[in-house]
Image: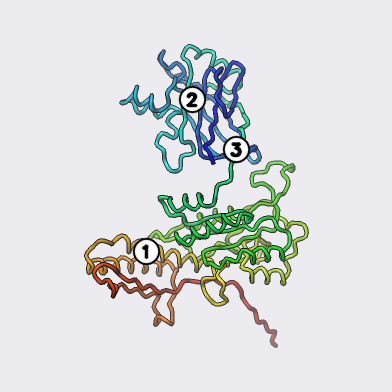
Amino acid sequence: MTATTLILGISQFGLSLTKDPQPSALASVTMLTQYAFDDNVVAKINVIDDKSVTNPDDPLNNLIFNITFADKVDGGVISTLSGRLYVEGGVDALQEKYPSNFGYIVQKLDFHGALDGEHDFFDAVETRYSTAQATAIRNALNEAGALNTIGAYRKKEAVLAVPASNVADVEPSKVRRSLLDMAQRPRYLICAEIDNLPMIEALAEVVDKLNCHLAIDIGEIADWEMAVAVAESLNIQDYRIQLFWNPNRSRPTGATTLLARKKWRPCVGDYLGKLLLRNANTNASGIPPINRPVAGFYFPLSFRDLEKLPGVDLDEEAQNALAEAHINVVLNEQFEGGSRWIFGDALTLHDSKTSALKLSNAAEIVTYTDNLVVGIAKKHLLKGMQSYIEDATREIERALDSCVGANLLTASPELGGKYYQLLLTPRKDAPFEKVDIKFIRRPEGCARQAYLETTVTK
């Protein structure tokens, strides 16, 4: 998609937010971003006069602009920026005119995006106003209901609709290339549609090359037999890929009115959020508790007022068929003390009845330890051969021992009760430059089913 340009204009007629330049504006704030907006986004603008002393070259430096982009449905904040106007030229002009006054530069709205960080919402922000129109601009802000005095009890703000972005479908090949070229390896990929099979194939290729995980939501389906048919039609058998089905509807999370009707929505976003929260709870060695699959009682969904879609019937036959198709379903389960809406299974698309790789936590442990070994092995490359084998072996074993301590690996009878086996040896066909690494381990699994045998005695 192309970059989105938004221009906040201040004129004698009030405030406006457009995608096109406004020649008649007394002042403007031009914002460039790679993100797209739909029709449900608003911009809230409030300006605070901090009463600081200004100079004739910048008479509006005492006005602090606070611009908040938010979802007009639930009020969720998308992004914010705060700062002061500059007469013209953006951060380049600021740096040229005030090379030794960094404190002055960082106060300006133009500073947003100047550092060009990976997570910056705006690539560039540039403000402009005429010093001769300073009084008119202040009056326009006051008439628009956006100007506040510092410490005011009631905050005044103007709310403007954000024009929707023109978004063109991205080619799967570009998505694939962008993901492979990322400086940091993505650990999880999320796909909330199944209509675009070339895109799913591109993501599956990224999963294979980067050894990461992909969660796919199969969409709004009200028939379990169709859900199974969709899963079978994908015909993917990879332990790093999972399918999810949310046969339910719910209210928006931040709904404050009964008019916020229940609607279906994908569940993979909630799943990703829980994955990241779980992973943030690392131990002293920095290892996340990936031995705990994100499913079941301890990871309830945060959707509000969930209920099944009309016509959905998840009886025993349906649940068995869905499990056979490796689909993780959002369902309501009864537990001691009440019921919860949960991810009802922890299955991958690995086609095996006995392999640990059919379980999501075991699959994560395998990719985590594989990437750990590869990362350390690459770190020691271009050392002397003997030094490489000794140093890499020592550091990899230390890291794997930490994984054992974090309960990621379990003792294996096939390894004589050991948790893993690691062997680095010079390759026979090129012993001066190549090394073979043999790594065997047994990952932790998860209890999916329990069978009760109950007896009444005298």
In terms of sequence position, does the residue under pointer 2 or pointer 1 come before the other? 2
Q: Name the colouring of the figure.
A: rainbow
User: Which mark is on residue 30?
Assistant: none
Q: Residue furthest top?
A: 132
Chain-order first, disc 3 or disc 2: 2
Question: What is the C-alpha distance between the residues marked 1 and 3?
Answer: 42 Å
The location of residue 154, given as percent across then percent down, is 59, 26
Three-letter code, disc 2: Ile
Q: Which residue is mark 1?
A: 374
Image coordinates of residue 214 in percent, x first then y, are 53, 59
Specify the label residue 64 is tagged with.
2
Give the structural element (helix, strand or loop) at label 2: strand
Q: Residue at x 48, y 30 (%)?
A: 82
Q: Amino acid at mark 3?
A: Asn
- Looking at the rendered structure, the secondary structure element under dot 3 is loop
Nearer to the camera, 55 or 3: 3
Q: Which residue is mark 3?
A: 166
Circles 1, 3 touching at the beta carbon (< 8 Å): no
